[in-house]
Structure formats: C-alpha cells, structure tokens
Image (cartoon, rainbow, N blue to C red):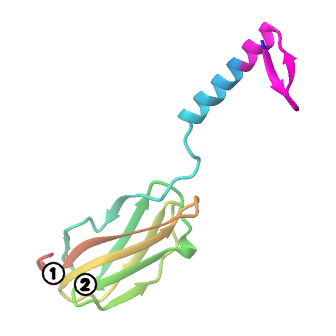
C-alpha cells in the first residue's frame, strides 16, 4: 500500500502497518462516537416543596437536588409571588455538593414560585421554576 507524502512522493507501507493504521483509525472513530462528556448540565431531579404542592405553614424549607455538583456560591434561589414581587433567599450550608437549601419564612397564604439558577461544573447556567402554594391557595 502507498500514500502520498509531502510533495507527492510515494511512501510504501507494509500490509501489517497499513492494517494497524486501519485498526487505530477505527478505534478512534468508535471512541469518538460513543464517548460522553465528563461534565453535564445541572438537571433538577428532586425538590422540596414538590411542584404544585401546598405548604400548610408560613415557613417553607426549600431543598433542591441536582444530577451533578453545583457551585452554590454562584447559585440563586428566589421566591416569586403571583403579583411578580420577589426576594432572593440566603442559601444555607449544604450537606451534599449537588444540593441547594434555603428557608422562606413568613409567607402569607397564596401562590408562589421558587425560581432557581445554578452553575454546573461544565460552566453552563441552568434555571427553572417550581410552583407551590401556602395555606391552601390555588396554584395557577
């Protein structure tokens, strides 16, 4: 077998070398097609309160668990009322690197949303909202 080299001089390869190059390129192709990136976007996998849930009291413990470690120092939890007013919560010391925790105290009865934003190890910011209510209000 021969391949062109430099200024079009022919380089001859033995059958054994050509076969090894073929195996090498096949292995590279297979790895490129089947490998996954090490880091991933943060995906919310569990929350307290759960979406559409009702909290009986005015103090709500918030716990958000993600599929990957998150940067808590650069992550935000905000509580939003139906009228659009909102306030940022102070995150608490967390027991696991993939969780955010906070407490919203003194919430009057009504509909709310937990608005969260987190930074994942891959450098991407992910955000979302969790609707809930306090004191039996209707979630809409």
In the image shown, does 94 or 32 lie closer to the viewer?
32
Q: Quadrant of residue 102?
A: bottom left
Apparent side of residue 109 relative to residue 72 in the rendered image (left or right): left
Calculate the distance from the C-alpha at mark 2 to the C-alpha at mark 1.
8 Å
State whether residue 113 is above or below residue 4.
below
* Residue 135 disc label: 1
> Residue 121's spot in the image, x, y percent?
58, 60
Residue depicted at x 48% and y 69% = 118
> Residue 17's spot in the image, x, y percent?
80, 13
Quadrant that contains the N terminus: top right
> Residue 122's spot in the image, x, y percent?
58, 58
Q: Which residues are magenta?
A: 2-21
In the image shown, does 74 or 17 lie closer to the viewer?
17
Residue contact at pointers 2 and 1, CB within 8 angstroms:
yes
Residue depicted at x 12% and y 78% = 136
Q: Secondary structure at mark 2?
A: loop
Label 2: which residue? 58
Residue sitting at the far top: 15
> Residue 9's spot in the image, x, y percent?
88, 24
Q: Earlier in the sequence, mark 2 or mark 1?
A: 2
């Amino acid at each position: 077998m021969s391949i062109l080299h430099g200024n079009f001089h022919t380089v001859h390869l033995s059958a054994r070398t050509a076969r090894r190059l073929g195996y090498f390129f096949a292995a590279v192709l297979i790895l490129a097609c089947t490998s996954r990136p090490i880091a991933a976007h943060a995906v919310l996998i569990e929350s307290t309160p759960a979406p559409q849930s009702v909290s009986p009291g005015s103090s709500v413990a918030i716990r958000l668990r993600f599929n990957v470690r998150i940067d808590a120092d650069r992550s935000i939890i905000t509580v939003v009322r139906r009228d659009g007013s909102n306030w940022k919560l102070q995150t608490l010391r967390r027991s696991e690197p993939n969780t955010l925790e906070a407490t919203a105290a003194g919430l009057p009865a009504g509909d709310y949303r937990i608005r969260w934003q987190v930074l994942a190890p891959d450098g991407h910011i992910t955000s979302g909202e969790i609707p809930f209510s306090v004191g039996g209000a209707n979630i809409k």
